[in-house]
Image (cartoon, grey):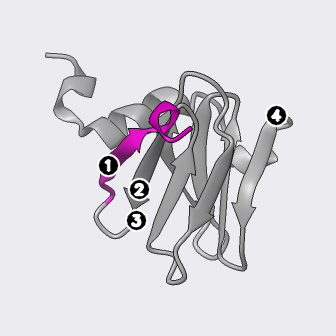
Amino acid sequence: MSPNARRSYSEFLFYNMHPFNGYIIERPGFKPLYENFVMIVGHFYEDAYSFNKLTKEEIGIFRFYSDPTCAVVGSNNDWCLVGGHILVLKTFYDRTLRPVGDLKDIF
């Protein structure tokens, strides 16, 4: 069994999404979608990330089919919604990822 098989899906995404050294927000192609005093949520092409400015912790959120277009973080900085081809909810306290729905059904 490969080492990736024992990791959770979120850990698998993070290790496969982040193949470079340094913080993701320092990459030239990183584009912020939402920022407050504590968190930055943005994307590097199709890969969405959150970055905690206080603890310098970055979390890979999801790999979209195309660039994500919007994001919002909860008032307690404990969850975020990121929208691209689907809408996903990421909770930071237990690191779960929940797909909310397919955005093509909204319009």
Cβ atoms at labels 2 and 3 below 8 Å apart = yes
The residue that disc 4 covers is 29
What residue appears at the point 24 percent right and 40 percent down from the top-left corner? Answer: 8
The residue that disc 3 covers is 92
Percent across and percent down for residue 22 are: 70, 44
The amino acid marked with disc number 2 is: Lys
SS class of the residue under badge 1? strand
SS class of the residue under badge 3? loop
Q: Give the Cα separation between the discs numbered 1 and 2.
A: 6 Å
Q: Give the Cα separation between the discs numbered 2 and 4.
A: 22 Å
Q: Residues within 10 Å of mark 4 (few under 14, many from 20)?
A: few
| Relative vertical location of residue 24 with respect to residue 72 in this rendering, above or below | above
Q: Give the Cα separation between the discs numbered 1 and 4.
A: 26 Å
The residue that disc 1 covers is 98
The amino acid marked with disc number 1 is: Arg
Cβ atoms at labels 1 and 3 below 8 Å apart = no
Label 2 vs 4, first from the N-terminus: 4
Cβ atoms at labels 4 and 3 below 8 Å apart = no
